[in-house]
Amino acid sequence: MAEMNNEYNPDLITLADDDGKEYTFEVLDGIETDDGRYLALLPTYSDPKKMLEESGELVIVKVGEENGE
């Protein structure tokens, strides 16, 4: 029998704001529309206490291309 791997491996992405401060998000889902591709992101934190203190709001971003990436 094949062994089941029940380990959760989230799809993480790091984005930087205009000031260069970086934030890490878990990619929950994506959708492609006529206007472009959008991702639903959930902020992640290395400190579990900070994660419990946050509101848990989703962040929706439009995927764009910059410098060919």
Image (cartoon, rainbow, N blue to C red):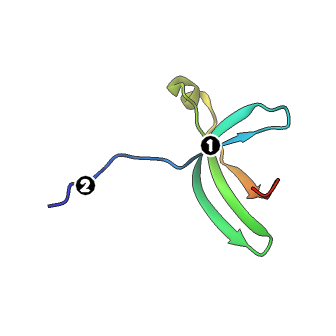
- Residue 16 locus on image (x, y percent): 75, 38
Q: Residue furthest bottom?
A: 34
Q: Would you say 5 lies left or right of 28 here?
A: left
Q: Residues within 10 Å of mark 1 (few under 14, many from 20)?
A: some
Disc 1 marks a residue whose amino acid type is Phe
* Label 1 residue SS: strand
Q: CA distance from mark 2 to mark 1?
A: 27 Å
Residue drawn at point x = 66 percent, y = 48 percent: 58
Q: Residues within 10 Å of mark 2 (few under 14, many from 20)?
A: few
Q: Is residue 4 above or below residue 7?
A: below
Q: Quadrant of the C terminus?
A: bottom right
Disc 2 marks a residue whose amino acid type is Met
Residue drawn at point x = 76 percent, y = 58 percent: 62
Upstream in sequence: badge 2 or badge 1: 2
Q: Would you say 67 lies left or right of 37 here?
A: right
Q: Residue furthest right?
A: 18
**Residue for badge 1:** 25
Q: Is residue 65 above or below residue 13?
A: below
**Residue for badge 2:** 4
Displayed quadrant of residue 2: bottom left
- Residue 18 locus on image (x, y percent): 85, 37
